[in-house]
Image (cartoon, grey):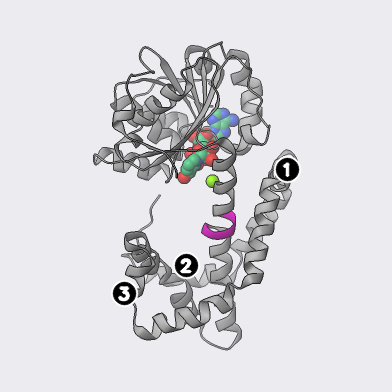
Amino acid sequence: MVKVYYEDAVVENALEGKTIAVVGYGSQGHAHAQNLRDNGHQVIIGIREGKSAEAAREDGFDVFEVSEAAKQAEVIMILAPDEIQGSLYEKEIAPNLEAGNSLVFAHGFNIHFDVITPPADVDVFLVAPKGPGHLVRRTFADGFAVPALFAVYQDATGKAKETALSYAQGIGATRVGVLETTFKEETETDLFGEQAVLCGGLTSLIEAGFETLVEAGYQPELAYFEVCHEMKLIIDLIYEGGFAKMRDSISNTAEYGDYVSGPRVITEVAKANMKEVLTDIQNGTFANNFVKDNENGFPEFKKMRAERAGHQIEAVGAELRKMMPFVKTID
Ligand code: NDP
Ligand code: MG
Ligand code: MG
């Protein structure tokens, strides 16, 4: 059973008197920085010049080059994109790490796949909210929080776990629960979830359903409503009350069809393919391909992005959403 930590697990403020450098001020960065500051912590921002740097200044933070922020801080939280963390660490962070510092992540990728090899005399841990940054900030402001995972990779000071829990408290997560894991488990399950189900599995499922209807001669606009637009309504019900609430709310026709046809689409073959995806994550094949493509300027990534953006469903959806001004964009 997973171990869950709440407010009462934080017996001391292990961040007392420490400066926290939040590196990056994007989705996660702005939320961590603002929540920590609201909880009384000393936060500075390490970032390159640009849009995010301006936003951080506007929000009242002291903004420095990443190297300078790393030098000033005892706790360094890396919230830059995963694919640039390796070179950012090499050039700007590693030279400014001191014994006893904490090197912190919100995703285990670079540590788990050995892109970053920290020195033995620093604490290394992760605190990963299970939701996008804007939700991390909004729920905090409303008095709640997004649950988070934490894991200790390296405990040089003997206080890594206390520091991780104090950090989790700082961003609000102990209000609702912080689940203990390892870098290996967080990294592999996170990658699998987004690839096989949440992002990859879902968009491929929608595209295949759309193509099936359109190729059979049905109007693309109707196909869009049936296989894409209604997805959110179904997911909201599952989010609130599991499959039970969703099945309670749909018609008996839909529920009967759910049972007889769902397993014909996601068959044992699909599950065997999922296992192959998981194997590629576990043995480093996926990480290796991603890192290599990034080193070459992401040619494969950009090609796939362009191909998928050109799918008919995207053009059809863009037109239909204009009819529905109540469908708000969440940025
Ligand atoms: P974003 O892309 O939203 O933000 C990245 C930030 O890093 C931006 O402020 C960007 O600034 C800055 N940055 C980019 N390049 C550099 C550079 N060379 N030097 C300094 N700063 C730079 O990232 P996320 O917040 O999505 O992800 C950050 C981490 O959080 C990742 O490890 C991710 O896996 C993890 N995570 C993300 C979640 C999410 O829902 N987004 C959920 C849980 C974990 P600029 O504006 O200049 O580009
Ligand atoms: Mg992820
Ligand atoms: Mg219908």
Mark 3 neighbour density, 10 Å: few (under 14) some (14–19) many (20 or more): few
Q: Position of residue 286 (x, y in %)?
A: 69, 48
The amino acid marked with disc number 1 is Asn
For marks 3 and 1, give the CA distance: 44 Å
Q: Residue beneath label 2, please?
A: 318
As drawn, the residue found furthest toward the left would be 143
Q: Foreground: 76 or 305?
A: 76
Magenta highlight: main SS: helix
Task: Classify mark 1: helix, strand or loop.
Answer: helix
Instruction: Identify the disc placed on residue 257.
Output: none
For marks 3 and 2, give the CA distance: 31 Å
- Quarter of image, res 320: bottom left
Q: Residue beneath label 1, please?
A: 288
Q: Residue beneath label 3, please?
A: 248
Q: Foreground: 106 or 87?
A: 106
Identified at 45% across, 83% down, the residue is 257
Identified at 38% across, 53% down, the residue is 330
The amino acid marked with disc number 3 is Asp
The amino acid marked with disc number 2 is Ala
Q: Position of residue 241 (x, y in %)?
A: 32, 62
Which label lies toward us, 3 or 1? 3
